[in-house]
Each structure stands twice: as C-alpha cells, then as structure tokens.
C-alpha cells in the first residue's frame, strides 16, 4: 500500500506525496506558484516571456554595451541576421521593452530598423572562427 503521509512545509500548507499530486490540492498549487512565479501567467504569456528572454540573451551574447547609453554595439567579427533577412555587421542594437532597434551607417546616413519582439521568429549569429 502506498504511503499516504503528508508533509508540512514551512508555509504551513499540507502537501501530498509526489505520487498523488493533482490539481485537487490547491495548497500545492499555491506552493508551486510561489516557487515559480511565471506559473501564474497564462501559457501563451509564459511562452512570449521565455521567447523574449531567450532572444535578449542571444543579442547580449552578440554585442557589448556602449558606455553611457542603453544601446549595445555588435562585437568585432560578429554579424546578426534577424528573420532570415538582412545581415547586420557594424550595427548598434537597442533592446527596448516592446521592440528592437538596429542602427547602422550606410553612405553617411544613419539607418534605423525596428523589429517587434513578437514578430522575431529567428536570430542567426555569424562569427569568424578563431584560429
């Protein structure tokens, strides 16, 4: 017969053994929500948050901060391609809450390209191999 002892957590909630965990234990749900706050968000919002966080990490890897600004400059010998479109080499990135701005200089002109976080489907980083 399965052990049906309950464990009392520091929060004072009774939690069932792992083998009988189900949504019927609201206290367990509360405990998991406190451990993992993102569980409280609807699934589609959790996915968007995770996606944005992952994309931010990719951009942070490919760039370095510019002193005195919130912008980031692409690292030497690293290029970025967003959504299988144009490849950016000597560009400056701004990672905003709702968008990504990429600034590049072409023929003495500053060209800004804006991407909505939700519409970025892929990011490719291209780097030269170190010898």
Image (spheres, rainbow, N blue to C red):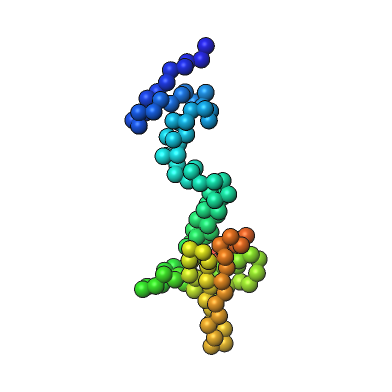
Q: Is residue 67 left or right of residue 104?
A: left
Above or below for 1 versus 23: above
- Residue occupying image coordinates x 50% and y 60%: 56
Residue 126 can be seen, yes or no? no
- Residue occupying image coordinates x 52% and y 76%: 103
Above or below for 34 versus 48: above
Q: Is residue 118 left or right of residue 32?
A: right
- Residue occupying image coordinates x 44% and y 30%: 27
- Count of numbered tags: 0
- Residue occupying image coordinates x 39% and y 72%: 69
The location of residue 78, given as percent across then percent down, is 53, 68
Q: Which of 101 and 22 is in front in this view?
A: 22
Above or below for 36 versus 56: above
Q: Which of 131 and 14 is in front in this view?
A: 14
Above or below for 7 versus 109: above
The location of residue 118, given as percent across then percent down, is 58, 60
Q: Residue furthest right?
A: 84
Q: Is residue 82 left or right of residue 15?
A: right
The location of residue 123, given as percent across then percent down, is 59, 62
Residue 8 can be seen, yes or no? yes
> Which quarter of the picture shows residue 126?
bottom right
> Which quarter of the picture shows residue 9?
top left
The location of residue 7, given as percent across then percent down, is 40, 23
């Amino acid at each position: 017969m399965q052990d049906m002892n309950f464990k009392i957590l520091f929060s004072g909630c009774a939690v069932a053994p792992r083998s009988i965990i189900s949504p019927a234990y609201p206290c367990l749900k509360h405990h998991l929500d406190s451990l993992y706050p993102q569980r409280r968000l609807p699934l589609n919002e959790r996915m968007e948050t995770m996606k944005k966080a992952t994309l931010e990490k990719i951009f942070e890897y490919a760039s370095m901060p510019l002193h005195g600004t919130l912008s980031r400059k692409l690292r030497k010998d690293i290029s970025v391609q967003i959504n299988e479109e144009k490849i950016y080499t000597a560009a400056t990135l701004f990672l905003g809450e709702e968008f990504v701005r990429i600034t590049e200089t072409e023929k003495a002109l500053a060209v800004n390209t804006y991407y909505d976080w939700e519409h970025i489907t892929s990011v490719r980083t291209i780097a030269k191999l170190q010898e």
